[in-house]
């Protein structure tokens, strides 16, 4: 625990002007970002007697090791910079609203030739129109099903669309009249685009025009005695009215507004937002946050506005925003909202009438959301705290292990040996900290040796990071590897470090992984309190030996053996046996199983990539783009193998030297085995399959979306 007086700046050094300040911990990680009209007055509040500070503020200032600030010209600039830094650094002590669910939107992909209506979650994409958010995906599908009678817009996926275009037969919706079937040319691209625009206009609240038009067409059809057509139009009108009834009118003046309500207690706050468009509630969402310090309701509203509109622009910011309390001062926030919209935005507290009544409804929702969250979290926090305390007691640790790292080795009969590192902080997954390793120090199957290599590589980088941040003196030695003043480990034979899709080798890779110096999360910067390995006594001994060789003695190690779920600790002949009902054992099992899942997913990906490898992969200087061009031009590797150098040169981007290299590589490579019909035993004389290593078709993605954050090392 740091003493705030040890890093308190002199009052005369702090400017008396608007600005944004950052508190950093001992690892140079940004833990709090704030803004102030006067930096001198605001920062002075943090360096008073600790007994006078709010408990959360006291924890923050004693965790911090330094403070710095940036001066800006106006309070609006301070608001923008504060939002940018909170998004960039993700400080642990800032007010951060957590969505209580991932809300679905009704999206129309207007950026495509034939726009598609679908359910979308996650980050918004450019060129896509969004409506919502909705509480449930089924509510979107019900609404779309009703509207497709009148606006038969495409709803199928890209694969279904292409297959229908290839066969010349539309899907079922095309046959029953709920899709205009652009896949088979029943409607021109510009007409389908106009149909999608009308769908968007109706969803945006401009409903009267279409209802009046359909009613007029129905009356004309009835007068002309086209009763079947009139009946269809009648049903269309009924479908539109039914869809409109799903969103009842709450504001008679067709207002576009967002209503924000806050329910709070001493520790937490819940925010509820109703999105009203055209006088109807079009969406609802809610957030919950921990109150880091004594913030006012107006300050909570300000943070909610930043998160809600920080990445929005244009019509996504409504003309009117109704709140329970105004930020202080309100002018910079209102100017910021106006700049986001590009037109004037009214930010005010409703005083009477329908808007005040609707705000009371939103407030009741916020109170219910806070009560439900506290009920869920009380159980969850109690369970996690008990689990960490049980682990600390069983392993004789000085304190609960707030950061746990778990390692697992995966291979298939000694091939494609890889390892995983997963991180749990405060008993919860920290997926942005996951890492993946390739075992390169030796070939073959040896889990103990592999574990020693992985632990060594991971903590060498941690020690290098300590050296780079100045926790050691320059010129120190790290396990025989020289560490220079910049923190670069110069270790021959260290292997390569692959980051993302590219690959670096030796000191270049490590320098690249450690070049961050402004508080952003670094790859191996933060040490765990506990290292868990998947295995028994041999794996635990290997991990402990690796740490001892690096001179690290303040990190505990244990292993979890699968057979009897025994917990092994270094130097002990007998395991620690936790009760089957132990929350600590359950947490260790979750950590171990997550490491196993992450490792085996990576190993399978590497194996699949190796199986897809073909003769073109061995051609030096031939990238994916030119491999795709070759296969597209010749149709298969078999035809490419029989082509002359002059014919290969006809492919765009292929010169004579490259063509000669390709011809030599294909001549030396053995042709693929012929395909055999297993039913008849007949050899199938067909084209050689594409074996370009995934160079055509969909790109090969390593792992699930939430795993792609795990860097490969």
Image: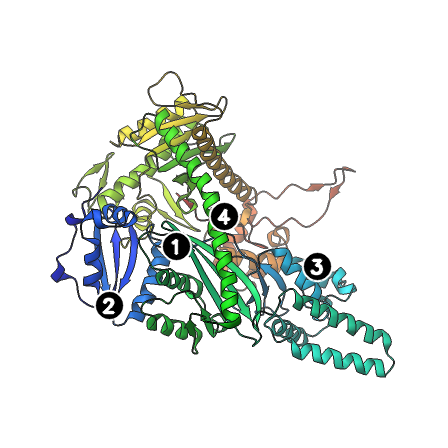
Quadrant location of the N terminus in the rendered image: top left
Q: Are marks 4 and 1 in contact (CB under 8 Å)?
A: no
For the residues labelled 3 and 4, the Cα–Cα distance comes to 47 Å
* Residue 270 x, y percent position in the rendering: 44, 54
Quick one: label 4 or label 1, which is nearer the N terminus?
1
* Residue 551 x, y percent position in the rendering: 24, 31
Please determine whether, in this image, residue 38 is positioned above or below residue 528: below
Q: Nearer the viewer, residue 205 or 629?
A: 205
As drawn, the label of residue 549 is none
Quick one: label 3 or label 1, which is nearer the N terminus?
1
Quadrant location of the C terminus in the rendered image: top left
Q: Which residue was labeled with disc 4? A: 372
Q: Nearer the viewer, mark 4 or mark 2?
A: 4
Q: Which residue was labeled with disc 1? A: 96
Please determine whether, in this image, residue 478 is positioned above or below residue 26: above
Residue under the point 51% across and 42% down: 606
* Residue 712 x, y percent position in the rendering: 42, 44
Quick one: label 2 or label 3, which is nearer the N terminus?
2
Residue under the point 56% across and 60% down: 629
Q: With 29 as the anchor, is 191 left or right in this view?
A: right
As drawn, the label of residue 18 is 2
Label 2, residues with CA under 10 Å away: few <14, some 14-19, many ≥20: many
Residue under the point 82% across and 75% down: 229
Q: Which residue was labeled with disc 3? A: 163
Residue under the point 48% across and 60% down: 363
Callout 4 secondary element = helix
């Amino acid at each position: 625990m740091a003493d705030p007086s040890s890093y308190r700046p002199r009052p005369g050094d702090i400017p008396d002007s608007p600005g944004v300040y950052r508190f950093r911990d001992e690892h140079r990680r940004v833990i709090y970002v704030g803004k102030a009209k006067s930096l001198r007055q605001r920062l002075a509040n943090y360096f008073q007697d600790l007994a006078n500070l709010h408990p959360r503020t006291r924890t923050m200032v004693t965790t911090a090791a330094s403070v710095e600030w940036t001066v800006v010209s106006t309070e609006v600039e301070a608001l923008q910079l504060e939002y940018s830094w909170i998004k960039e650094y993700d400080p642990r002590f800032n007010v951060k609203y957590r969505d209580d669910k991932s809300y679905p939107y009704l999206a129309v992909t207007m950026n495509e030739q034939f726009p598609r209506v679908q359910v979308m979650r996650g980050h918004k994409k450019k060129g896509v129109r969004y409506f919502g958010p909705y509480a449930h995906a089924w509510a979107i599908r019900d609404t779309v099903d009703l509207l497709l009678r009148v606006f038969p817009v495409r709803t199928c996926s890209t694969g279904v669309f292409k297959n229908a275009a290839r066969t010349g037969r539309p899907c079922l919706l095309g046959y029953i009249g709920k899709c205009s079937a652009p896949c088979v040319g029943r409607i021109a691209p510009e007409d389908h685009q106009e149909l999608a625009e009308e769908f968007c206009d109706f969803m945006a609240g401009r409903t009267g025009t279409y209802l009046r038009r359909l009613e007029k067409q129905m009356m004309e059809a009835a007068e002309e005695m086209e009763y079947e057509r009139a009946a269809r139009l009648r049903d269309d009108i009924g479908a539109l009215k039914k869809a409109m009834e799903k969103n009842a009118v709450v504001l008679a003046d067709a207002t576009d507004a967002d209503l924000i309500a806050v329910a709070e207690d001493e520790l937490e706050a819940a925010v509820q937002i109703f999105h009203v468009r055209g006088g109807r509630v079009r969406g609802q969402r809610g957030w919950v946050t921990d109150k880091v310090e004594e913030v006012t309701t107006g300050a909570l509203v300000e943070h909610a506005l930043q998160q809600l509109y920080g990445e929005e622009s244009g019509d996504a910011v409504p003309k009117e925003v109704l709140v329970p309390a105004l930020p202080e001062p309100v002018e910079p926030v209102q100017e910021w909202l106006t700049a986001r919209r590009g037109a004037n935005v009214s930010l005010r507290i409703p005083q009477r009438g329908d808007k005040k009544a609707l705000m009371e409804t939103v407030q009741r929702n916020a109170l219910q959301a806070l009560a439900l969250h506290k009920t869920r979290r009380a159980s969850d926090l109690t369970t996690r705290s008990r689990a960490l305390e049980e682990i600390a007691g069983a392993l004789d640790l000085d304190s609960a292990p707030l950061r746990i790292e778990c390692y697992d080795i995966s291979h298939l009969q000694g091939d494609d040996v890889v390892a995983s590192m997963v991180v749990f902080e405060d008993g919860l997954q920290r997926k942005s900290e996951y890492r993946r390793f390739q075992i390169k120090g030796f070939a073959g199957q040896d889990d103990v040796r592999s574990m020693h290599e992985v632990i060594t590589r991971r903590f060498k980088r941690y020690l290098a990071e300590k050296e780079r941040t100045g926790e050691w003196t320059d010129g120190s030695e790290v396990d025989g590897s020289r560490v220079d003043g910049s923190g670069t480990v110069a270790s021959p034979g260290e292997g390569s470090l692959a980051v993302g899709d590219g690959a670096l080798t030796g000191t270049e890779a490590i320098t690249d992984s450690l070049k961050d110096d402004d508080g952003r999360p670094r790859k191996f910067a933060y040490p765990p309190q506990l290292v868990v390995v998947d295995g028994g006594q041999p794996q635990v001994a290997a991990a402990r030996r690796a740490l001892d060789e690096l001179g690290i003695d303040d990190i505990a190690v244990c292993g979890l053996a699968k057979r009897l779920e025994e917990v092994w600790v270094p130097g002990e002949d007998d395991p620690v046996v936790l009760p089957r009902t132990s929350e600590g054992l359950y947490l260790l099992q979750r950590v171990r199983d997550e490491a196993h899942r992450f490792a085996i997913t990576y190993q399978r990906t590497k194996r699949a990539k190796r199986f897809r490898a073909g003769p073109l992969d061995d051609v030096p200087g031939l990238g994916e783009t030119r491999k795709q061009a070759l296969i597209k031009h010749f149709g298969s590797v078999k035809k490419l193998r029989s082509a002359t150098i002059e014919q290969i040169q006809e492919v765009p981007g292929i010169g004579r030297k490259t063509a000669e290299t390709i011809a030599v590589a294909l001549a030396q490579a053995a042709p693929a085995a012929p395909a055999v019909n297993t039913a008849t035993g007949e050899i199938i004389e067909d084209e050689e399959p594409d074996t370009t290593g995934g160079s055509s078709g969909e790109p090969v993605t390593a792992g699930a979306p939430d795993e792609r954050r795990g860097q490969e090392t």
